[in-house]
Amino acid sequence: MNKTILITGASSGIGKATELLLYEKGWNVVATMRNPDAGADRTLVKRKKRCY
């Protein structure tokens, strides 16, 4: 069973680093941020890898 985590503030800093680390380890990551454009580069990669 995959683990799922919700990360707030994922556009930079600790939130971004945590999001990337856990995603690479196979977690299901739900990431929120105030400025979605800041995370647009990571969104495309993740959607290609697993679509819902």
Image: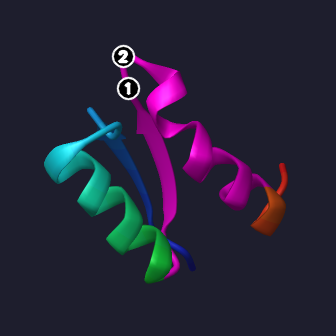
Corner quadrant of residue 28: bottom right
Residues under labels 1 and 2: Cα distance? Answer: 4 Å
Q: Position of residue 14 (x, y in %)?
A: 15, 51
Residue 20, disc: none
Between 10 and 6, the one lying in front of the other is: 10
Query: Does residue 20 sit above or below 2 in this rendering?
Result: above
What SS does tag 2 mark?
A: loop
Mark 1: few/some/many CA within 10 Å (<14, 14-19, 20+):
some
Residue at horizontal 76 percent and vertical 53 percent from the top: 47
Q: Position of residue 36 (x, y in %)?
A: 51, 23
Query: Does residue 50 sit above or below 14 in this rendering?
Result: below
| Magenta range | 26-47
Between 16 and 25, the one lying in front of the other is: 16
- Badge 1 amino acid: Met
The residue wearing badge 2 is 34
Residue at horizontal 59 percent and vertical 37 percent from the top: 40
The residue wearing badge 1 is 33
Q: Position of residue 22 (x, y in %)?
A: 37, 71
Query: Does residue 25 sit above or below 9 in this rendering?
Result: below
Mark 2: few/some/many CA within 10 Å (<14, 14-19, 20+):
few
Residue at horizontal 52 percent and vertical 79 percent from the top: 26
- Badge 2 amino acid: Arg
Between 52 and 49, the one lying in front of the other is: 49
Q: Position of residue 51 (x, y in %)?
A: 84, 55
In the picture, measured across the screen, residue 16 lies left or right of residue 24, that is left
Q: Are marks 1 and 2 in contact (CB under 8 Å)?
A: yes
